[in-house]
Amino acid sequence: MLIAATQAFADKGYHATTTRDISSLAGMSPAAVYIHYRSKEDLLFQISLIGHELSLGVLDAVRETDPVERTARAVASFARWHAEFHTTARVVQYELGALSPEHHAEVVLLRRRIEARVRDMISAGVRSGAFDVPDVGGAVLAVLSLCIDVARWYRPDGRRTPEEIGELYADLVLRMLRPAGDEPGTVPSAPSPDL
């Protein structure tokens, strides 16, 4: 049911999707939706929770202690996740406004945890002298925006694999954060950007 709802929301948008659309994709009757979920909005909430928890888990899985290597691996993994799971990520990121205030508040807590992970990585790099970032908050927003936006444009039949996108984005982020003249060097450079 969640997979069908995710696909329906991605295809038509939350507001244009009916429970009949979802049940049809799931191979069930329209009444079956309400056996498992209280409402269409509850389905969206469950998808949002799962998507945010999974993407947070991607960041939490990075264990490197060197701030440059940690940031490179985290960005590569986060961007790759948004490509591999672009349908879910698109729904999670772009249908957030359709959640009820209570559900929205729960998802915002997860989003703050994701933001905190990226802030911690960048701040560690600043403290170590590896990064030259006068506005850490602005850098956090830029990094998150860059990775999250992959879900909007990524196509499985495109020129780049999720792994190549991850490598490219890690390289771009390191170039953005490091002092002028420093060579990123920790992540192989990807081909010229023709996304």
Image: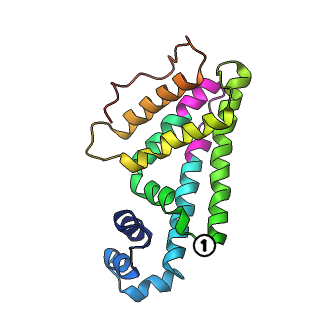
Instruction: Please say whether residue 181 is one of the residues in the magenta stretch.
Output: no
Number of other residues with Cα within 10 Å of mark 1, as a class: few under 14, some 14 to 19, many 20 or more: some
Instruction: Please say whether residue 62 is one of the residues in the magenta stretch.
Output: yes
Residue highlighted by disc 1: 100
Q: Nearer the viewer, residue 118 or 66?
A: 118
Q: Secondary structure at mark 1?
A: loop
Is 20 drawn above or below residue 174 in the view shown?
below
Residue 126 picture location, percent across and down: 70, 24
Residue 118 picture location, percent across and down: 63, 39
| The C terminus - image quarter | top left
Residue 124 picture location, percent across and down: 70, 28
Q: Give the quadrant of residue 62.
A: top right
| The N terminus - image quarter | bottom left
Residue 45 picture location, percent across and down: 55, 69
Residue 43 appears in the rendering: yes
Q: Nearer the viewer, residue 48 or 3?
A: 48
Question: Which residue is farthest top?
Answer: 181
Residue 61 appears in the rendering: no
Is 32 drawn above or below residue 194 in the view shown?
below
Question: Which residue is farthest right?
Answer: 127
Q: Nearer the viewer, residue 3 or 182?
A: 182
Along the horizontal axis of the image, is 50 left or right of 4? right
The residue at 40%/50% (across/down) is 152
The residue at 59%/25% (across/down) is 177
Identify residue type, mark 1: Ser
Along the horizontal axis of the image, is 63 left or right of 46? right
- The magenta stretch is 58-73
Q: Give the quadrant of residue 53.
A: bottom right
The residue at 38%/40% (across/down) is 162
